[in-house]
Image (tube, grey):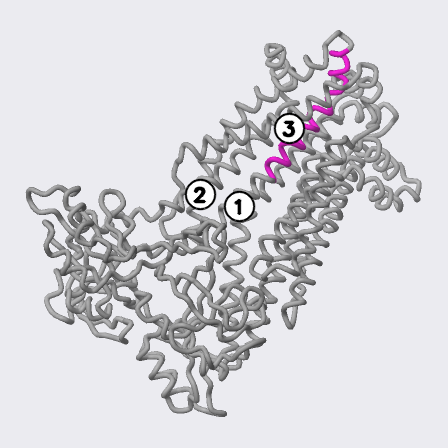
């Protein structure tokens, strides 16, 4: 039977092109997404060079372990964006070990036109490989070394914006290194600018001492005094102590591409299964003849499975190669548009490629098995009788899967109102996937009344084309459903994602802009010195600094990443109108208080969280604000709590409460001196919205782009298969007197009908999800922005129409050029 399957594949190459293309492109999509996503985990290779010459590195912990109030639930562990500062007495305790010690103080600093945001002691530069591009080391307190490529030359006087305010330096040298970009000053100046905060301690073994022995000595010296907050790193683990300026970008691209891979898996599985089912359904006459010749149902099933796996193996290997070729350009595009770190690229990861191939083979096997079961149950006479007309397009399995998909979306839509607004996005998109999958699977049932409705005007006029189009669509329902399915997925994915993103984004903007009462904003980062100077400028009644840092709240594996917004609680109400439902913002003081969104904690409760440097703190709830979309998963924290828990103690921006008619010139000058800019609040929101739109658009393209491209190819692939297999239909039309032009017009009209059917079902599928989202948001927000992205969705629908027309008319044009008698004698 395997030999027969191989001979069938060779004899019917054209019939297997569609399944080959669907499976190969599906595996390519999975491979490209997986390689691009997984490469984000190791894209910061420059970190390995930071302390390359050190044998042992001591650093603060950079992970948080949080436990639930219920002791029966497992703890959650997550990496944090910063490391905890090392104890001030640790260098003294390590002075007895057999190693030369270098203390790294990493203070915040930025310099116009230069890359990097940290100043390190010059002594740390000896621990990574580098050469001089120009000049030499700093020799005095005003000397500074830059990292190549540098915009400034040796001898230039420059201003660095530091956490202590602006500071003047003279460029003493430019260092060429593979380590992350940084600035270097004398050890004393670096310690001063870091406020003596120790980031890491690097040790190099002395003669006669091995790295392993030194590591053991260091661990003994640290002992239990570190309280679990100190890590002793050696070997390959030393990279974990290096600065990683691209951590948040890599985490973001990992999330986007991980979701893209998940969507690609669902879409690929659906398209491949649909294509296999249709390819097998078109061969019913062939299977009927085999059954008439004595083939058993088991032999038919083995034949179909053998053919499928023969094609699948070749298709999966070809798809994996194509996916690997696409991964690198896709990763470069992500870096070019700012969604990924500079230099980000995809690398070959053998197990990821193997997994994509394995998933492709599994999907092909399941799809072929389902189709083979149906083929094996066909009786000889039934197959021959049904070859021209579909009598049962819906199977029991199709009913079950379709109803489960649609039915599973219903409780999720109902649960929208109980979810916190931060969780709505993920659940909304899951509902969209379930609904469009369910509608595509149930399309044979849903299409019949739609076909009657949409073709009624044409049929009422008595035109031959309209009548033939209606008859063809209704009698060949399996073919119609197969061609409509990828259109439903394409338009449904686009409409759901774009509508959901637009509604959530615009609603969040409206809420945030509505509550800001400050007429002007100073953008940062800004030192405390600059914030104080701006707040004391003439015409300023109050200046409230705001700093956002990640915080970590218990959640199942890993903890949830929330936003911690550090503010001056007593002054906050002067510039922001927050929807407080319990307590008072004025009580947000000290280092042990917190303001939380409603729904999880009550006034007076204790909240345990981890800060950005992994320090766990217990805070008392002094106020509760309404769980509105711009406040979801946000904790308001007292500004004093930030001290000592970050290497960059700076304000992101300052809201200004101005006297009526005040001149903003003095405040603007104070802001400019500290590297900031004073702008009206309306202009600030406009700039923020424009950048948000850009990033949201790019993220949507990255998330859905390859999946939508794949479904578009799926439309073309299915229609090419369907039209190429209609040789006898074309022959009948030609023999009854139809001209080539009339045949092409009928097939073109069918393509238009199929596209309209798919668009209608896609929109109908998305409507319940969008409606549930709007209702959920309206219950928690003062205003819901109902935005429908007509133009992008319309453009995608138009592209689907063009693809459908081209994919139908091209093979039809080939058929009508052949003699009708030859077509009538061709195989099915």
Residue at the (23%, 62%) spot, across then down: 87
Would residue 286 be counted in the magenta stretch? yes
Give the main secondary structure of the magenta stretch: helix
Relative to 754, say whether 574 is above or below.
Answer: below
Q: Nearer the viewer, residue 753 or 533?
A: 533
Residue at the (66%, 38%) spot, across then down: 715
- Number of labels in the image equals 3
> Percent x, y for residue 611?
39, 63
624 sits to left or right of 148: right
Residue wearing tag 2: 36
- On the rendered image, what quadrant is the N terminus found in? top right
Label disc, if present, on residue 270 of the rendered structure: none
- Mark 3 nearby-residue class (10 Å; few <14, some 14–19, many ≥20): many
Furthest residue in direction top, as rendered: 294
Q: Secondary structure at mark 1?
A: helix
533 sits to left or right of 387: left
Residue wearing tag 1: 260
Residue wearing tag 3: 367
- Mark 1 nearby-residue class (10 Å; few <14, some 14–19, many ≥20): many
Q: Which residues are magenta?
A: 267-291
561 sits to left or right of 632: left
Q: Secondary structure at mark 3?
A: helix
Would residue 201 be counted in the magenta stretch? no
Real-space Cα separation, disc 3 to disc 2, in angstroms: 27 Å
User: Which sits earlier in the primary sequence, circle 2 or circle 1?
Assistant: 2
């Amino acid at each position: 039977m395997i030999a027969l399957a191989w001979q069938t594949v060779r004899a019917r190459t054209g019939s297997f092109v569609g399944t080959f293309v669907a499976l190969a492109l599906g595996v390519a999509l999975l491979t490209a997404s997986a390689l691009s996503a997984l490469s984000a985990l190791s894209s910061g290779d420059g970190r390995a060079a930071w302390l390359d010459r050190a044998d042992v590195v001591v650093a603060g912990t950079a992970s948080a372990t949080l436990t639930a109030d219920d002791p029966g639930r497992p703890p959650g562990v997550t990496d944090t964006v910063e490391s905890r500062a090392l104890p001030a007495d640790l260098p003294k305790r390590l002075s007895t070990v057999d190693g030369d010690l270098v203390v790294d103080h990493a203070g915040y600093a930025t310099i116009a036109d230069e890359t990097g945001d940290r100043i390190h002691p010059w002594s740390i530069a000896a621990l990574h490989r580098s050469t001089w591009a120009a000049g030499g080391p700093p020799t005095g307190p005003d000397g500074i070394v830059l990292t190549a490529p540098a915009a400034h030359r040796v001898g230039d006087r420059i201003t660095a914006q530091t956490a202590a305010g602006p500071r003047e330096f003279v460029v003493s040298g430019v260092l060429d290194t593979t380590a992350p970009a940084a600035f270097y000053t004398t050890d004393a100046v670096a310690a001063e600018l870091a406020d003596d905060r120790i980031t890491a301690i690097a040790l190099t073994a002395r003669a006669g001492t091995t790295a392993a022995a030194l590591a053991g000595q260091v661990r003994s010296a640290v002992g239990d005094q570190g309280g679990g907050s100190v890590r002793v790193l050696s070997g390959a683990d030393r990279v974990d102590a290096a600065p990683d300026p691209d951590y948040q970008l890599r985490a973001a691209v990992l999330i986007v591409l991980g979701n893209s891979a998940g969507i690609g898996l669902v879409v690929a599985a659906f398209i491949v299964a649909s294509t296999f089912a249709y390819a097998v359904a078109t061969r019913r006459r062939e299977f009927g003849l085999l059954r008439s010749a004595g083939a058993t149902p088991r032999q038919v099933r083995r034949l179909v499975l053998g053919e499928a796996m023969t094609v699948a193996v070749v298709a999966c290997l070809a798809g994996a190669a194509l996916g690997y070729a696409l991964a690198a350009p896709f990763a470069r595009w992500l870096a070019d548009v700012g969604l990924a770190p500079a230099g980000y690229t995809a690398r070959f990861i053998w197990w990821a490629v193997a997994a994509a191939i394995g998933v492709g083979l599994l999907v092909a096997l399941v799809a072929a098995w389902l189709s083979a079961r149906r083929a094996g149950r066909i009786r000889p006479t039934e197959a021959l009788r049904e070859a021209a007309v579909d009598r049962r397009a819906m199977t029991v399995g199709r009913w079950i899967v379709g109803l489960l998909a649609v039915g599973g979306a219903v409780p999720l839509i109902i649960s929208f109102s109980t979810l916190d607004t931060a969780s709505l996005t993920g659940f909304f998109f899951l509902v969209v996937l379930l609904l469009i999958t369910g509608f595509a699977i149930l399309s044979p049932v849903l299409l019949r009344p739609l076909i009657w409705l949409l073709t009624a005007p044409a049929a009422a006029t008595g035109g031959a084309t309209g009548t033939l189009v209606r008859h063809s669509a209704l009698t060949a329902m399996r073919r119609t459903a197969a061609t409509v399915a990828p259109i439903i997925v394409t338009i449904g994915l686009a409409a759901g994602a774009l509508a959901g993103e637009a509604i959530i984004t615009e609603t969040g903007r409206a809420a945030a802009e509505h509550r800001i009462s400050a007429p002007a904003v100073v953008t940062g980062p800004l030192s405390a010195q600059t914030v104080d100077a701006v707040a004391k400028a003439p015409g300023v009644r109050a200046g409230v600094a705001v700093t956002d840092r990640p915080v970590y709240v218990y959640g199942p594996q890993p903890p949830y990443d929330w936003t911690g917004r550090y503010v001056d609680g007593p002054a906050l109400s002067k510039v922001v109108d927050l929807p407080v439902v319990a307590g008072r913002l004025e009580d947000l003081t000290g280092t042990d208080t917190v303001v939380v969104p409603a729904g999880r904690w009550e006034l007076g409760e204790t909240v345990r969280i981890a800060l950005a440097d992994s320090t766990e703190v217990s805070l008392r709830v002094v106020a509760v604000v309404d769980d509105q979309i711009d406040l979801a998963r946000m904790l308001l924290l007292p500004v004093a709590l930030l001290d000592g828990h970050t290497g960059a103690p700076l304000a992101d921006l300052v809201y200004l409460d101005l006297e009526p008619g005040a001149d903003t010139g003095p405040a603007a000058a104070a802001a400019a001196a500290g590297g900031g800019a004073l702008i009206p609040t309306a202009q600030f929101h406009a700039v923020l919205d424009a950048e948000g739109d850009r990033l949201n658009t790019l993220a949507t393209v990255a998330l859905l782009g390859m999946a939508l491209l794949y479904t578009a190819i799926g439309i073309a692939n299915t229609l090419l298969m369907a039209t190429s297999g209609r040789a006898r239909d074309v022959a009948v039309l030609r023999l009854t007197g139809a001209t080539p032009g009339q045949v092409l017009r009928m097939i073109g009209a069918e393509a238009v009908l199929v596209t309209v059917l798919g668009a209608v079902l896609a929109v109908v599928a998305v409507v319940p999800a969008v409606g549930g989202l709007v209702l959920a948001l309206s219950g928690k927000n003062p205003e819901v922005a109902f935005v429908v992205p007509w133009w992008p969705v319309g453009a995608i629908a138009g592209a689907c129409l063009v693809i459908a027309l081209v994919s139908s008319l091209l093979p039809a044009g080939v058929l009508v050029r052949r003699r009708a008698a030859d077509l009538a004698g061709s195989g099915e």
